[in-house]
Image (cartoon, coloured by chain):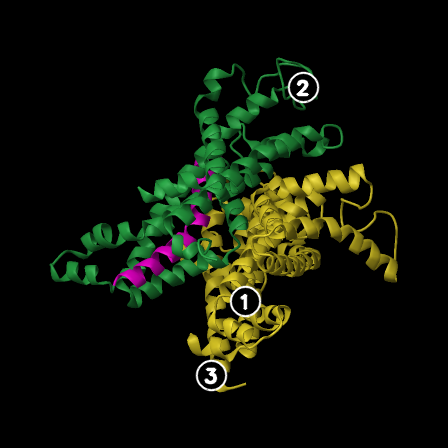
């Protein structure tokens, strides 16, 4: 429980955690607590924020409630961020584990494969995938997962490479444990901490990617998202700057809180590596 | 250059070519997954093309032949820089992309240099003032820019510097309707370049600053630095001559590897600033649902990354012979 203790003592990480927690609550319960659809026209268009107490953040180009858009946008951002990261982990961990554990030609083949994905400009690949498979929550989540697994595979491979010759692994081998067992029960639990840190940062970059895609018009047409709101307000930025300003702040705060939490986790889980303890 | 060096470069060339071949095959299958029949996708227009043109395309790309044969035709066409024609612009896809290439190279090149210089500078200052306010300020700024969506930052920069202050142009690459020549033209382009290049560069500045800071702090703990200090060397000289030189290499290496991300960022920056490069072309292709053009841009931008990585590899190999031996 040292980890939790050191994490709760880290003020910056707790600020990150607090903000993130708030967004999670908004995403989960917001639509039930706040009465309003992000699509319905409720007021005159271009209503500036803080003028009408019913629609505190004003309305967009079509007279839709901006606050409702933000609340529903929190949902899709966090959902896509979490699910795509989970899928990326499910691709990257086994690939990296096999490559690092078996080494030799298995490693060679898997790492060449990973390298191709690392060479390709990832945002361009995500754009192409979403465009070809038609924009939807599924294609967006899938595309983000496909462009974000390579760092996981590389990290896990490195961990497995350095852990596979440790004594407890050799002991497990002598015991006659199956390779599968050794990978799952012996090595993987010991390499979890860097994976957790990486995962929290991946959720952050997945949220940025999702917003960039919907900004370009590649969002799910059925779902209100922060990136879409900014993209839709792009042409009216001279008349109504707040329409693009507000959702951008929401994205930046969410991503920032995840990064802060990730750094805190890093310090709590790998106190030696983070280098902040000494000096 | 030694035989070893040449062999190494040769190996890298083969590897780069292999990556491009895989991407070409990948593109081939993606065209078949795009909505609509492949001939229409290749024509770049779903539904609205004339039958004769489609028939020509079918013959040119052998769409009535078996799949492996189609793949062969597609890949060999690609190797000869033939990516078909965009119907709307009535222009070969490859020529269209090459038309837009200089603008993107200018933008990404400027952003890369800017972010590398600024990032290294900020990282060095932060490390030198470790745990003082300058360090905290730089760390916080880096964290914030790291979390800000690039396209949003670009829009806010345009709003502030162009709409509000009216200092800088935020649309296109040159002033429309003025046929400038010589230095006037250069200045005009440079003025247009400032906003896109600095917003594209800021995110990467944040990345490099954080890396440089860590690298400086780690290097400053090594034994040879202690020796230099113990010899009574001036602290500033230790920083520039001992720590900086050694901390630089890992950062520059990672920066070189990450340069491909700049292309992705260019799609967003060029869209916001109407910068006439291949990123903007990608956005136009999306908008017109021209999948063939889209995949063409994707292929060429991947090729750019492969070439860039190749160049950095070769430079390293010449500059630091240890790298070659360690591989």
Letter of the chain in yellow: B
Specify which label sits upstream in the sequence, 1 or 3. Answer: 3
Q: Chain of mark 3?
A: B
Q: Please tell me the colour of chain A.
A: green
* Residue B170 point in image, percent of width and height: 76, 44
Outermost residue, bottom side: B2
Residue extent of the magenta highlight = A136-164
Dominant secondary-structure state across the stretch colored magenta: helix
Please tell me whether residue B260 is drawn above or below residue A38 in the rendered image.
below
The tag on residue B103 is none
Labels 1 and 3 share a subunit: yes
Task: Report the residue at 62% width, 70% height from top.
Answer: B240
Q: Dot 1 surroundings within 10 Å: few (below 14), some, or many (20 or more)?
A: many
Q: Is residue A175 left or right of residue B324?
A: left
Chain of the residue where label 1 is placed in the rendered structure: B
Q: Which residue is mark 2?
A: A50
Looking at the rendered structure, the secondary structure element under dot 1 is helix
Q: Is residue B278 magenta?
A: no
Q: Between A169 and B196, which is closer to the camera in this rendering?
A: A169
Residue A139 in view here: no
Q: Quadrant of the C terminus of chain B?
A: bottom left
Q: Quadrant of residue A47?
A: top right
Q: Which residue is mark 3?
A: B4
Which is more foreground, mark 2 or mark 3? Answer: 2
Residue beneath disc 1: B247
Residue A49 seen by the camera:
yes
Tell which subunit mark 2 falls on: A
């Amino acid at each position: 429980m040292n980890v939790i203790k050191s994490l709760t003592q880290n003020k910056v990480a707790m600020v990150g955690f607090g903000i993130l927690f708030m967004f999670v609550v908004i995403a989960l319960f917001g639509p039930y607590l706040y009465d309003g659809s992000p699509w319905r026209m409720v007021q005159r268009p271009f209503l500036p924020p803080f003028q009408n107490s019913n629609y505190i953040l004003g309305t967009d180009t079509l007279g839709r409630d901006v606050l409702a858009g933000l609340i529903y946008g929190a949902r899709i951002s966090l959902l896509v961020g979490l699910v795509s990261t989970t899928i990326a982990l499910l691709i990257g961990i086994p690939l990296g584990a096999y490559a690092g554990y078996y080494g030799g030609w298995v490693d060679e083949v898997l790492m060449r494969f990973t390298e191709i994905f690392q060479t390709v400009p990832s945002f361009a690949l995500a754009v192409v995938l979403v465009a070809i498979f038609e924009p939807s929550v599924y294609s967006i989540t899938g595309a983000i997962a496909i462009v974000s697994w390579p760092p996981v595979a590389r990290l896990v491979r490195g961990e497995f490479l350095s852990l596979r010759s440790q004594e407890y692994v050799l002991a497990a081998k002598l015991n006659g444990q199956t390779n599968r067992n050794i990978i799952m029960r012996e090595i993987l639990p010991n390499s979890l901490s860097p994976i957790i840190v990486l995962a929290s940062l991946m959720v952050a970059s997945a949220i940025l990617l999702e917003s960039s895609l919907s900004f370009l018009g590649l969002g799910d047409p059925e779902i209100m998202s922060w990136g879409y709101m900014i993209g839709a307000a792009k042409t009216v930025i001279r008349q109504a700057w707040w329409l693009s300003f507000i959702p951008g702040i929401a994205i930046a705060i969410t991503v920032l809180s995840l990064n802060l939490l990730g750094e805190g986790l890093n310090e709590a889980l790998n106190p030696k590596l983070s280098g902040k303890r000494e000096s | 250059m030694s035989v070893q060096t040449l062999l190494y470069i040769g190996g890298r060339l083969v590897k780069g070519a292999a990556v491009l071949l895989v991407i070409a095959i990948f593109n081939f299958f993606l065209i078949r997954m795009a909505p609509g029949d492949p001939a229409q996708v290749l024509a770049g227009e779903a539904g609205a093309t004339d039958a004769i043109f489609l028939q020509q395309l079918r013959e040119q790309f052998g769409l009535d032949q078996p799949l492996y044969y189609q793949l062969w035709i597609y890949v060999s066409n690609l190797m000869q820089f033939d990516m078909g024609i965009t119907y709307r612009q009535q222009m070969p896809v490859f020529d269209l992309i090459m038309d837009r290439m200089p603008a993107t190279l200018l933008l990404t090149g400027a952003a890369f240099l800017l972010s590398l210089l600024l990032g290294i500078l900020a990282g060095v200052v932060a490390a030198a003032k470790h745990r003082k306010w300058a360090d905290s300020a730089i760390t916080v700024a880096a964290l914030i820019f790291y979390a800000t969506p690039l396209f949003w930052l670009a829009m806010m920069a345009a709003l502030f510097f162009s709409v509000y202050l009216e200092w800088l142009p935020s649309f296109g690459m040159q002033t429309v309707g003025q046929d400038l020549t010589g230095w006037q033209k250069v200045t005009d382009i440079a003025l247009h370049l400032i906003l896109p290049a600095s917003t594209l560069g800021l995110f990467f500045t944040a990345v490099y600053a954080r890396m440089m800071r860590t690298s400086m702090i780690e290097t400053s703990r090594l034994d040879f630095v202690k020796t230099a200090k113990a010899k009574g060397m001036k602290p500033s000289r230790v920083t520039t001559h001992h720590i900086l030189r050694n901390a630089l290499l890992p950062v520059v290496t990672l920066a070189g590897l990450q340069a491909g991300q700049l292309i992705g960022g260019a799609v967003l920056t060029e869209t916001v600033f109407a910068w006439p490069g291949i990123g903007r072309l990608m956005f136009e292709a999306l908008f017109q649902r021209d999948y063939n053009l889209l995949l063409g841009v994707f292929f060429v931008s991947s090729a750019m990354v492969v070439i860039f990585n190749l160049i950095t590899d070769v430079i390293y190999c010449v500059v630091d012979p240890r790298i070659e031996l360690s591989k």
